[in-house]
Amino acid sequence: MYKKLTANRIPCKFICDSAIGTAMSEADVVLTGAEAVVESGGIINRVTKKHTKTMIFCSIIISKNCFVCLTCKGWNIHSCIVC
């Protein structure tokens, strides 16, 4: 995702999982990837599920918008955006 964003001249910063707390205050918006979204709105992220949860909680606490990005096959696009 980072490569695609920077290739399209969208300024972003790639951070390691342990820097989530300190980097969050500098962010305008938080983006994360996922493999799937379940009916309840929960996300499935098999690579860094522990850190994704921490990142989303941090963004909520400091009132930053957080979006989960994934490929939507056969879904209404509004079903694929989790805020």
Image (tube, rainbow, N blue to C red):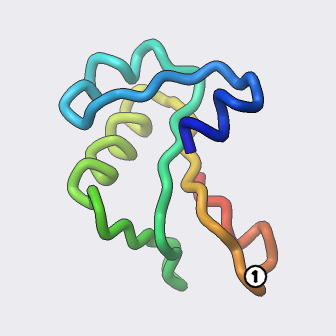
Residue sitting at 65 percent across and 40 percent down? 4
* Residue 25 x, y percent position in the rendering: 41, 16
Q: Is residue 32 above or below residue 35?
A: above
* Residue 28 x, y percent position in the rendering: 58, 21
- Residue 58 figure quarter: top left
* Residue 6 x, y percent position in the rendering: 65, 28
Amino acid found under the numbered disc labelled 1: Trp
Residue sitting at 42 percent across and 35 percent down? 59
Q: Nearer the viewer, residue 46 or 6?
A: 6
* Residue 2 x, y percent position in the rendering: 54, 36
User: From the viewer's perspective, is 28 left or right of 18?
Assistant: right
Give SS at disc 1: loop
Q: Is residue 70 above or below residue 79?
A: above
Pointer 1 local density, CA inside 10 Å: few below 14, some 14–19, many at least 20? few
User: From the viewer's perspective, is 56 left or right of 50?
Assistant: right
Quarter of the figure with the N terminus: top right
- Residue 46 figure quarter: bottom left
Residue sitting at 21 percent across and 56 percent down? 50
Residue sitting at 19 percent across and 31 percent down? 18
Q: Nearer the viewer, residue 60 or 48?
A: 48
- Disc tally is 1
Residue tagged 1: 75
Q: Is residue 17 above or below residue 13?
A: below
User: From the viewer's perspective, is 80 left or right of 29?
Assistant: right
* Residue farthest toward the right in the current orientation of the protein: 76
